[in-house]
Amino acid sequence: MKIDDAVDYIRNLIDTEIDLSKDNFVEFERKGKGMAYAIDGSSAKLFDAYSFSVFARRVGYVFANERKVIERKAKDIEIDIIYAENADEENDARRQKEEISLAMECCGENIVMIDGALNEKIDEVVGISKKSGLKKGNIPILFIIKKFGEKNLPNKCWYYEIEKNVYAVKFHPYSRFVFRVDYYGNDLEEVLAEIASLCNDVSCLGYPYPLAEVHRLVKISREEAEYLKYELQKRAVEKGLNLEEWEDLFYDYHEYLE
Amino acid sequence: MIGRIVGKSVGEIAFRQNYKEDVKIGEILIADDKEKNAIFFLRVIDIQYGQEGADKWGIKTAGDMLLLDERNEEYDLREKERRLFKICICKPLGYVQNGKFYKPKTLPSHFCAVRRATSQDYKFLEKYMGDIEVGKLRSGEKEIDVKVGIKGELIPYHIGIFATTGMGKSNLMRVFAASAMKLGKYGILIVDPHGEYYEGSVGNKGLKHHPMAKDRLIVYSPHAEYGMNKLVISAYEISVSDLEDVFTFSEAQKEALYALQSKFGRRWLVELHERSVSELSEIFERRIQDITFSVLKRRADRIMKSEVVHMDESVSTTEQIIKDLHSGKVVLVDTSGLYEYEELLISVVLARKILNKNKNLFRNKEEFKKIPPVLITVEEAQRVLHDGIFAQIAREGRKFKVGLCAITQQPKLIKEELLSQFNTFFILGLADEGDRNILKSSAKQDISKLEKEIQTLEVGEALITYPGAPFAIPVKIHRYDDYIKRIENENKKNEILNERIDEEFY
């Protein structure tokens, strides 16, 4: 496909007439006050021996109200060796499990938000995804819903039920983004209204700021990953491993190419 | 703590500033290096915005703020103390380790804490400070309790005072003179074309108000009042080269002038004034055109009519002025009310006489040793610092203990070669880039990165550069009135102390 053909294809997709029922867009009021836990995890692949990979993962939480962060905690970075062909997927699954596990620890009276969709039914946790693989035809569903929502309920907070327990939500009247929200509990509007009270930080307008905070908190930066790689290698040598063997094991030709 | 160091190199240090702190250009801060047991002096030369996150984040956030402002929507920016910051770019000035100052040849440790300096940190500077006190050390806009002065021994190595109008030149000059009067060991000649130094100006005191003025200030004026001396020079003291510094002459006129000087010696100007054009033509066997003599005669007549020029060889105050200077006095020559050529002529004649006197004394080492350094101040120095006597003093004065103090707001109009002869610079606020550039290339310290600081200097703030100083010294010049008040108080204290000693002795 040439560039022009690709552009035409995308334009046709966007222009496809899809009708969504107006009635399915539900407006909700933002609460003045709110309080929630935000959970997130981060991982980095440190070494890849093809038959197995070495990952680093870290999860953490932020507890905040509408004004400030009350508590933040990042767990220690864990090193994990994964023997699997689809090591990356397995790593993602393990990270999510760790996030859910932490979320369950935090559950109580407060809302617990987690970055991403929920793959299982957990009443106490709200999954909020920046991206979603859900689509209508070949078009990302969030794109369509946002387009309709802006037309139907401009400058309002609203939600749209995509499927049972999965919603598209606009948390701030002037947000440019609509997020996928997974929620299995019974107080949807109450929960959304409270989360919306955490979405007026101008630096991430319309997104719960505790989630942005926890993302920054747990993120394993490139520098951290480099340090971990160095530490692993150093400790390996200290424990008698031959450096040449180590390098042969994790030899990545791409690094040399770049 | 103000911040922590994050980079960059030996030539330029950057630190992340604590959100709540306010740092200003020109501030001198301390990087407290516990690892090296040293303190590094950093001068803030630039302040930049910083944010955690991508560059676009700030632009997007500002856009959202504008949108919400327009819609009267409330919003918040949380954790800004952590997410927003400023990066201060500093020029390392050097470091002190075990009480000794070193040029900046090494880096402070990573993440070294940066704090404000205390007067204790500047203790090491005391040995670089001279006896002619002009102000206090400054860090940005803050005054630090460390006296700043230049060494009197630097006087013959010339001083430049550079500032745009209103930035505090005359206050600095008065403070300098006040300090010299207090010491009584340097001869300072101040030619005052605006009459601002003696009486002072509205709301500001003058040199006559100095508590030691009676003994240490000598005033010469064409309109001498009580306590002043009559200013007069003899026509016999004026040489052709003096006139060349004051007027412009054609080659033919110059030849005629030198011919006159050759023929009549010291009487040449009187002869030119008294004789008719035809007489002069006769004397020079018509080798010089009448028209040339006519022009020169008109000039001579004008000079001879001046109230400060006397026909009598013995009537002159120049010798007395030199004596006063050699006895460590501040001599104020009031030329206000005179024509510009008269003021220049007085300056030029005095400057030449002082240089020649010191040159003569130089032959007698014992006598020469006894005389103090003499400083000749020249207002609007760009008018005279080209050729002639002032250029000569700039080039050779140091050998004969004669220094120039060039005051100008346009240093770019002074020859670079002459400017490079000036060892001490007082740089006050200078608006013109050309003026700043010429100083950058001539200063005895590297001030190339201090562009912003010089631009933002407030009235009375200055940078001083001189050889031997560890770096360009930021100073807040004393306010003259306050300074003489302090001297007065010090004198009173000393008197009381002396009285007590006497009483106890007897």
Image: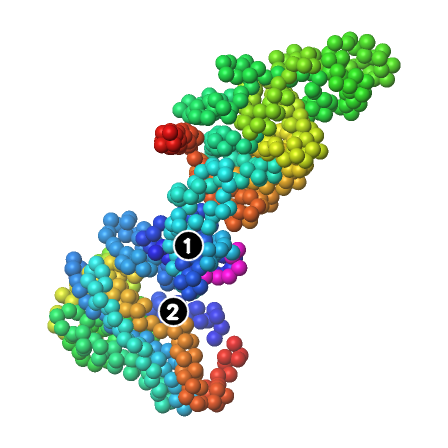
- The stretch drawn in magenta includes residue B427: no
Q: Chain of mark 2?
A: A
Secondary structure mostly seen in the magenta stretch:
loop
Residue A109 lies, with reference to residue B359, above or below; the image says below
Q: Quadrant of residue B316?
A: top right
User: What residue would you read off at disc 2?
Assistant: A12
Q: Which residues are magenta?
A: B103-108
Q: Could you tell me if residue A225 is visible in this image? A: yes
Instruction: Determine if the magenta segment contains residue B104.
Output: yes
* Image spot of residue A249 (x, y percent): 46, 89
Name the residue carrying label 1: B30
Residue A45's disc is none
Dot 1 lies on which element? Answer: strand
* Chain under disc 1: B
Residue A119's spot in the image, x, y percent? 24, 80
At mark 2, the secondary structure is: helix
